[in-house]
Image: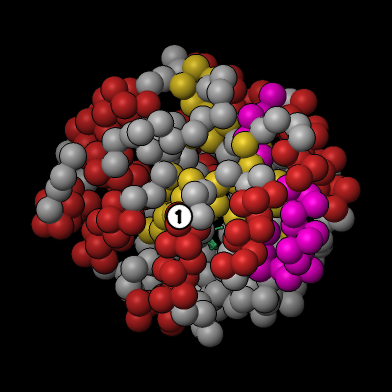
Amino acid sequence: MSLTKDEIIALLKDETHQQDLFDKADKVRRQYVGDEVHLRGLIEFSNICRNNCLYCGIRRGNAKAVRYRMSEDEVIETARRAVNLGFKTIVMQSGEDMYYDTSRMCRIIEAIKKFDVAITLSIGGRTYEEYKAFRAAGADRYLMRIETTDKALYHKLDPKMSWQHRYECLLTIKELGYELGSGIMVGLPEQSIESIAEDLLFLKEIGVDMAGIGPFIPHPQTPLAKEKGGTLNLSLRTMAIMRLLLPDINIPATTAMESLAPNGRIQALKAGANVVMPNVNEGEYRKLYELYPNKDCTQTAPAHTKSAVVQKILSINRTIGTGYGSHRK
Ligand code: 5AD
């Protein structure tokens, strides 16, 4: 469906009729991608990061963050267990940690690929050669949020990073034949409604296969600790409009939404989302990947986390995806 920027702005601002928007997005979701909810097993394998984004709890400058880095074997073992729990996609996410160089990443990807799963990477900005090598090793998808298309805001929040470079990474990833996931945070300091509308049009323009949209949640150990943060409702409206603009893509009910309300992800699944990414880290690693506070299920084991999510999904009359859950165009 095509919407003008002004129409998107009007929908973003309209709190009174947001239920109509959610219902519409839910209907479009059912028509285009059906009732299946695809589960992705999320391994957060390192919280070491070379960047210093003002909003992020694992920013380089957060001296209080307890850092960890899984060994190759630990990542592969975590993936193996997730596959045994039934996950058909493994998402490997980390800070921008260059310890995982090309050969190390490729070895991990090749090992996990043997488990017959789709592999998604979410490890930030890399070179063309690296993206190419990861793809050749078996990576199918790549997630990298643009965070905001307001370039001035991006450069304020992500010091020393280049918006243009990030954008070019997205184009490279797409060109190399990955399924491309991108997305934004909603409610960043000084982010306007107009700018969120532009973000949505940007994601449509580059033709993402997946769009992750979640509220910004201030982390107490960051420079943005005292900021207000995004609301669940505005994030849900943004996500629902994304569904209208790109009816057949994958849209996750994001973990950050669950952090703002106990049923945040279920609300999202009823407003256009069709994917959930439960954390499959083991033990201590579960709570140390703290991008923002109050993350869901940092205390429960992967098997329990997964069955709780499955139960909730079934309780709203949706089914669990049985395939890889690729973008079906
Ligand atoms: N609140 C919400 N989301 C955040 N992210 C990072 N920090 C925060 C925060 N404080 C998101 C970014 C990043 C993704 C992995 O997590 O959008 O791309």
Q: Kindly indicate the quadrant of the structure image that contains residue 308.
A: top right
Residue 76 in the image: x percent, y percent?
Answer: 82, 43
- Figure disc tally: 1
- Quadrant of the rendering where the C terminus is positioned: top left
Residue 96: in magenta span: yes
Numbered range of the magenta stretch: 86-109
Quick check: can you spot residue 216?
no
Say whether residue 250 is left or right of residue 305. left
Q: What residue is at 26 percent from the left and 28 percent from the top?
A: 28
Residue 215 in the image: x percent, y percent?
Answer: 43, 55
Say whether residue 143 is left or right of residue 57. left
Quick check: can you spot residue 171?
yes
Q: Is residue 204 above or below residue 320?
A: below
In the foreground, 193 or 263: 193
Q: Kindly indicate the quadrant of the structure image that contains residue 126.
A: bottom right
Identified by mark 1, the residue type is Lys
Say whether residue 209 is left or right of residue 59. left
Q: What residue is at 18 percent from the left and 52 percent from the top?
A: 8
Residue 296 in the image: x percent, y percent?
Answer: 62, 43
Type of colouring: secondary structure
Q: What residue is at 43 percent from the left and 82 percent from the top?
A: 156
Q: Is residue 160 above or below residue 216?
A: below
Q: Is residue 155 above or below residue 147?
A: below
- In the picture of the structure, the residue carrying the numbered disc 1 is 174
Secondary structure under tag 1 reads helix
In the foreground, 243 or 10: 243
In the foreground, 261 or 193: 193
Say whether residue 201 is left or right of residue 173. left
Residue 209: in magenta span: no
Residue 244 in the image: x percent, y percent?
Answer: 24, 39
In the foreground, 284 or 294: 284
